[in-house]
Amino acid sequence: QVQLVESGGGLVQPGGSLRVSCVASGSIFSIYGMGWYRQAPGKQRELVASITGGGTINISNSVKGRFTISMNNAKNTVYLQMNSLKPEDTALYLCKSFSTQGDYWGKGTLVTVSS
């Protein structure tokens, strides 16, 4: 199994920046990709960005140019750097791992963009 713990969420003003992190533990050898998803109140969960072990990155059009995803293999951590934040970016941000043993979710970290 894989355990995922997100951190770094909080309250930020529109136009501000925030970086959220996700640390993986457990059967990390089985992970071949990681992703960040978000879910706003009353809306469906959506993919924000994903990255594979080989470095292939996929970014949602809604955040392209503002968000970047990166991975530090030595720290078993995936990051989501969020710039030029907008109120519509407010959501629970969840980390997901894709592994040969199945897919796993973290509990999420809340990001609120408001003045």
Image (spheres, helix red, strand yellow):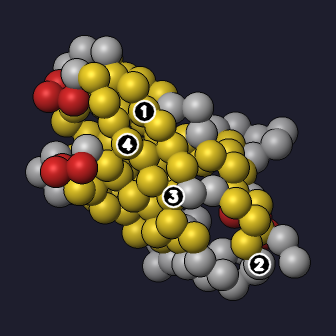
Three-letter residue code for mark 1: Leu
Mark identifier at residue 20: 3
Q: Residue at x 17, y 57 (%)?
A: 55
State the image coordinates of residue 9 (x, y, percent, origin top left): 63, 56
Mark 1 and mark 4 in contact (Cβ < 8 Å)? yes
Cα–Cα span, label 1 and label 3: 13 Å
Mark 2 crowd level (few <14, some 14–19, many ≥20, 10 Å Cα): some
Cα–Cα span, label 3 and label 4: 10 Å
Image quarter where the N terminus lies is top left
Q: Residue at x 55, y 41 (%)?
A: 94
Q: Earlier in the sequence, mark 2 or mark 3?
A: 2
Cα–Cα span, label 2 and label 3: 16 Å
Residue that mark 4 sits on: 23
Residue that mark 2 sits on: 13
Three-letter residue code for mark 3: Val
Cα–Cα span, label 1 and label 2: 27 Å
* Pick the front one: 99 or 60: 99
State the image coordinates of residue 86 (x, y, percent, origin top left): 72, 74
